[in-house]
Amino acid sequence: MRKIAALFLIAWSVQVQAQTIQHHSFTTHYNATLGEPDSVSWELTPAMVDCGTIMRIDMFASDPQIPGSTKPKDYKKSGFDQGHLFPYADAQCDSTDRVECFYMSNMVPQLHSLNAGDWKTLETQERHWAGSQAIRIIAGGFGTKGKLPSGVNIPESCWKAIFVDGHWRAWVMPNEKTSKGHKFGFWEVMDIKRFDRIVGLKL
């Protein structure tokens, strides 16, 4: 576990412009210029996925630890989902997590086809892995397709890196209508060094 933690910390060596906020089960690196997190990280454990399904109640809200941060209304009529990085299904076993996962510092604008498509497929897979082992997850967006009317950046793609079975695996999914209907491995980047170059991390 110490080795995993060390690798996890190395991954944040380039996150120097973001404001780091520690919540109960996830850490957000919030970029006020973009109006969204550069990345969000968490550990997903067997205990976090063994409570069954708890009814979701959407409670989107500004992050109380970040004055002036993005508000739910900033996405209104934008055509984009408030896309969770630390997802509700990972949070549902804890009452605090169920609230904090809806903070806007945990969201990026995602087309619904991505949010409810291949992104969700990978989220389901991560919980399958976490059923038998603790895994580490880092997720974010990069690039820009423009901005919401409110000024929030629309990422060109969304990415996720998962430390599972003793090594890092990584995915990059375009924020496009085509990001649906694929198995979880479709968007996997097999060359971790190439993934580092794409998203600006060091895994």
Image (spheres, rainbow, N blue to C red):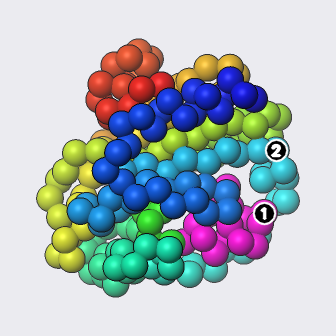
Residue 77 image position (x, y, % from top left) = 27, 80
Q: Quadrant of residue 127?
A: top right
Q: Quadrant of the N terminus?
A: top right
Judged from the image, the secondary structure of the residue bearing numbered disc 1 is loop
Residue with the mark numbered 1: 93
* Residue 24 coordinates in the image, percent (x, y): 68, 62
In space, the residues marked 2 and 1 are separated at their CA atoms by 11 Å
Q: Is residue 103 highlighted in magenta?
A: no
Q: Which residue is mark 2?
A: 46
- Could you say whether the residue bearing mark 2 is in a helix, strand or loop? helix
As drawn, is 2 to the left or to the right of 125? Answer: right
What residue is drawn where x is 40% and y is 58%? Answer: 19
Q: Position of residue 55 (x, y in %)?
A: 72, 74
Residue 4 to residue 71: above or below: above
Tell me which corner region of the image, top left, top right, bottom left or bottom right, holds residue 121.
Answer: top right
Query: Which residue is drawn at the image coordinates 45% and 79% (left, top)?
Result: 62
**Magenta highlight: main SS:** helix
| Residue 100 included in the magenta stretch of the image | yes
Residue 92 pos. (x, y %): 72, 65
Magenta stretch: give its range. 88-102
Task: Examine the rendering and report whether any part of residue 187 can be seen.
Answer: no
Q: Confirm or deny contact between disc 2 and disc 1 (CB under 8 A).
A: no
Image vertical order of residue 77 relative to residue 24, above or below? below
Q: How many marks overall?
A: 2
